[in-house]
Image (spheres, grey):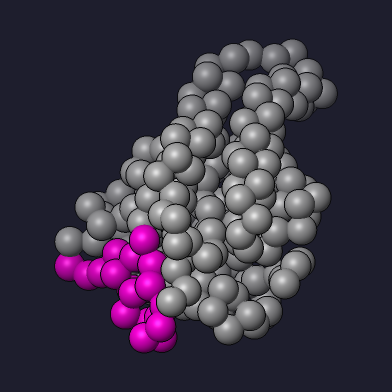
Amino acid sequence: MSHIVLLGDSIFDNESYVSNGHSVIEHLNQLLPSDWRATLLAVDGAISDSVLLQTERLPSDATQLVLSVGGNDALRIASSLFASRSADVREALGLLRQVVARFCHQYSQVLDRLSGTGLPLTVCTIYDSVPNLGEAELAGLAVFNDIITRECFKRRANLIDLRLLCDAHEDYSEISPIEPSHQGGLKIAKAIVRRVVRGDADSTTMICHD
């Protein structure tokens, strides 16, 4: 039996935010063929370095790994970065580069650990169609997503681009607009099935290695 393991944050661990619907893991287990199953190790609120703890609980029969993390790292950095003042745009961009360097290091460690298992790995970008997201936040997320895609491609991992996938207001929870709704979770689960189970590539997924 093939066994998908979901690691990361509340993009996958979103049960608390879909009181009138299904979570990503529930959608996924309903969509998977009978000879596949999925396990949730992702934890709401996780940041990149805490995923290393999740890897210690990987099931021995895992056959596929899917990771979605980085959004909470971005929130933490934004809270401190936006409190800073700079004299000009050039200085502000330099400050941004400095503060995301730690995320780059931590995210790289996570991908190294997951790649070291020898299991096929799929990673997700951070979505950016969250309702009421400001221009500054969008600019910041672009930097985080550049790191994610760069580190993904360096390791020839596969990619699901949540920026293209979760592009509607209804994809986000009414309880917390930064979490996937029932509809958003279904989109994510379907993308995992397309990429991981069927090996398909479309406008929201990229196959870098099989």
The reply, left or right, for residue 71 in relation to residue 183 is right
- Residue 30 position in % (x across, y down): 32, 80
Image height check: is 97 above or below 26?
Answer: above
Question: Is 94 located above or below residue 6 in the figure?
Answer: above
Foreground of the two, 152 or 10: 152
Residue at the limit of the structure toward the front, as seen here: 60
Give x and y (percent) for residue 89.
77, 25
Quarter of the figure that contains the N terminus? bottom left
**The C terminus: image quadrant:** bottom right
Note whether residue 116 is visible: yes
- Residue at 61% x, 50% y is 117
Residue 98, image x, y percentages: 72, 21
Which residue is pictured at 71% across the width and 52% down the height? 152
In the rendered structure, which segment of residues is drawn in magenta? 20-39
Residue 166 shown in magenta = no
Of 78 and 186, nearer the camera is 186
Q: Tell me if residue 11 can be seen.
A: no
Occupied quadrant, residue 127? bottom right
Give the left or right position of residue 180, taking residue 80 as reference.
left
